Image (cartoon, rainbow, N blue to C red):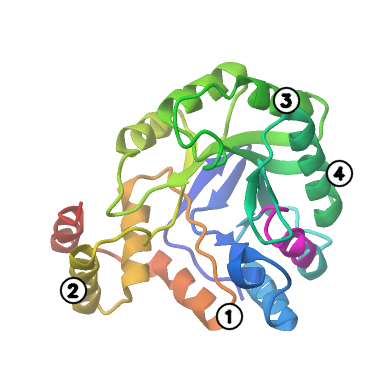
Amino acid sequence: MRTIDHAGTYTLGDRQVRRLGYGAMQLAGPGVFGPPRDRDAALAVLREAVASGVDHIDTSDFYGPHVTNQLIHEALSPYSDDLVIVTKVGATRGADASWNPAQEPAQLRAAVHDNLRNLGLERLDVVNFRIHPGHLGRGDHSIADSFEAMAEMQTEGLIHHLGISNATPTQVAEARAIAPIVCVQNEYNLAHRDDDALIDELAADGIAFVPFFPLGGFSPLQSASLSTVAERIGATPMQVALAWLLRRSPNILLIPGTSSVSHLRENLQVADIELPNEAMRALDAIH
């Protein structure tokens, strides 16, 4: 039976999706490298997510590499018409599990074909170009050559919609000048709110914002404040952090990941959490 998602929906390209999705990164082995510790459990999480009403899944062929996409294919193919699979390109994995930039047009094209093959698709629903953190750092260097290559593959019909990840506002604007984007995926949470203005700008234009690391980089004091609010309303700190993101802006889509069915169910309960105004004030003060 599908759950009722009180968090509502938002537009992702030409589709309406529930705002609470699923991120597949944790299905790979330790360090997002190699096979999962328990393959059957990984398959069960994917099937439970879709059975519970999740209709967008975030993945990449550099998770594993290839592992999460192959698991998604095995667990969910043939895919439901209402399922949107969002992937990303821009990196490769070394034999030592290193993350290496792969931002050149030929590398991006190879990555798109890897995603198509391992997911068992003829066209990818949404592809984020992820600016690699080791590639000149997160700065305002031009991404024109890379994103023009992405737009070319969209024109060819290999990609339906484009997005961008780990990008500055300047790079988001540069990408949008080359081709329309449907989402931006950046680090953002209660403690790290550099993209506040960008989120509001994207919301005005109907573009989704997908935060990653919802609990990343919290100081001990910030973590303690979050835990206090969570205890007060009878939820976990992760649930409260995710609920705050849902309330922060209607264009925010969440992709919490897990390799556990029980943790998946806990994450999906976030849709039913209502944060009272006093809790929101306490959470806003964390920043």
Q: Which residue is mark 3?
A: 149
Q: Callout 2: 10 Å neighbours few (<14), some, many (20+)?
A: some
- The magenta-colored residue range is 60-72
* x then y, percent, for residue 60: 68, 52
Residue depicted at 36% across the width and 69% down the height = 239
State which quadrant residue 182 falls in: top right
What SS does tag 3 mark? Answer: helix
- Closer to the N terminus: mark 4 or mark 3? 4
Q: Quadrant of the N terminus?
A: bottom right
Q: Nearer the viewer, residue 164 or 2?
A: 164
Q: Please state which amino acid type lies under the numbered disc 1.
A: Val
Residue on which disc 2 sits: 228
Question: From where the camera sits, is residue 15 visible?
Answer: yes
Say whether residue 64 is magenta: yes
Sequence-wise first label, 1 or 3 = 3
Q: Which mark is residue 122?
A: 4
Nearest to N terminus: mark 1 or mark 2: 2
Q: Residue furthest top?
A: 177
Q: Which mark is residue 261?
A: 1
